[in-house]
Image: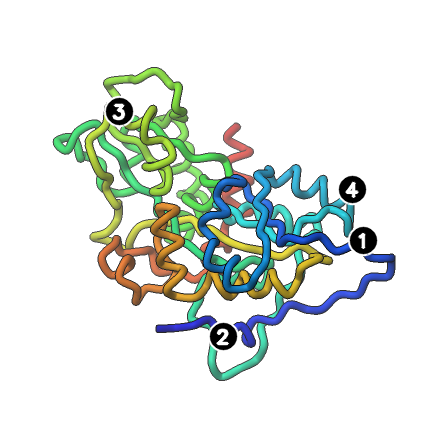
Amino acid sequence: MWVFAFSFLVMTSCTVETAKPLKSQALVIASDFLYAKDTVLFKNFIEKNEVRLIIRHLSPERIIDEVKSKEYNSGIDMVLSQNMQTPIKLNKSGILHDMVEEESAVKSPNQYISYRHNFVGIGLDPFVFKYTSDSVRVIKHYQDLSNYPSYYTLSESDKLSFLSPIRKVQKRAKTFEWIKKWNQQSRFRTNFTPWNDSIRVVLCKYSQLETFKDSLWENYAEGCYFPNEDRLGVYFDVMNLSIIQQAEHFTDAQKFLAHCQNSGYNATLNKELNRFPIYDYLKARLEGPKFYPARIKELLQYQDIISRMLIKLK
């Protein structure tokens, strides 16, 4: 079993020229998908380290606004996000603490650390298909979505993570044409969208099978389908953590990063959040779908290009 060697992940220290505020009594994590009640997920960390932990549900824009306006008094130490676009946006705004990879012969087993965008991946969230019934599985690959009507539940941020691997395997012009066709064939599906019998499949994130369960999926067959398993594997987004610049509880934040990358706890956390662990040797990964074999740099390589394509299509 791997235990994350945190010595290989070094956060550069910072200096504070202004007077520090009085130290608060809790590690504060801002999240775009968790809420205050979800602190129960981290009960073991809280008890082991004898710290209080507070989760604040905030959008990326709100996080940026609070940190920039309140500076050292924002009270936010970390950000836990459901997609890769949130830390990219926060990092561009200059509010994330810099991460530096230490030169060492032994590297972290976590393949989902972005030193460029200053975040640590802690969970994988595959893009899956949901069918109206088991008998209508005509669409089995992502590439088929440009030829058939479909729904999707993806946010604009989710789309960037979904479309980047498609750009990786084909040229820019061909990718643009594929996205254009998919855009024409697909419709955004919310919890309240009227049901359309002519559309038999929904593209969604695996985690949404639980969060949308009661309202969206009542007309669908049980379970889901993992596309592209007979090819390179399912595309996915990455749940991640990052540390805010001038974090008041920097040491506790480092400990929390290490805790969430511990292989045993990583498997437990992802099971609770309906995702898959970051380590491919764990039971949930061995019994789960085949994942698209890409490191974090490859997943992020084409996102700016995809973003411009989506803007053009609007």
Q: Where does the image place residue 168, in percent across and percent down from the top left?
A: 41, 53
**Number of other residues with Cα within 10 Å of mark 2, as a class: few under 14, some 14 to 19, many 20 or more:** some
Q: Which of marks 3 and 4 is nearer the N terminus?
A: 4
Q: Mark 2 points at which residue?
A: 5
Query: Where 296 falls versus 158 (above or below)?
Result: below
Residue nearest the viewer, comparing 252 with 230: 252
Question: Label 1 sits on what residue type?
Answer: Pro
Quick check: can you spot residue 171? Answer: no
Q: What residue is shown at x 47% (from left), y 81% (from top)? A: 106
Residue hosting label 1: 21
Q: Name the residue under label 4.
A: 69
Q: Which residue is drawn at 40% across and 54% down?
A: 269
How would you rate the neighbour count of disc 1 (Cα within 10 Å): few for under 14, some for 14-19, many for 20 or more? few
| Mark 4: amino acid | Ser
First in residue order: circle 2 vs circle 1: 2
Q: Farthest residue toward the bottom?
A: 105
At a point 28% along the width and 17% down the height, the residue shown is: 196
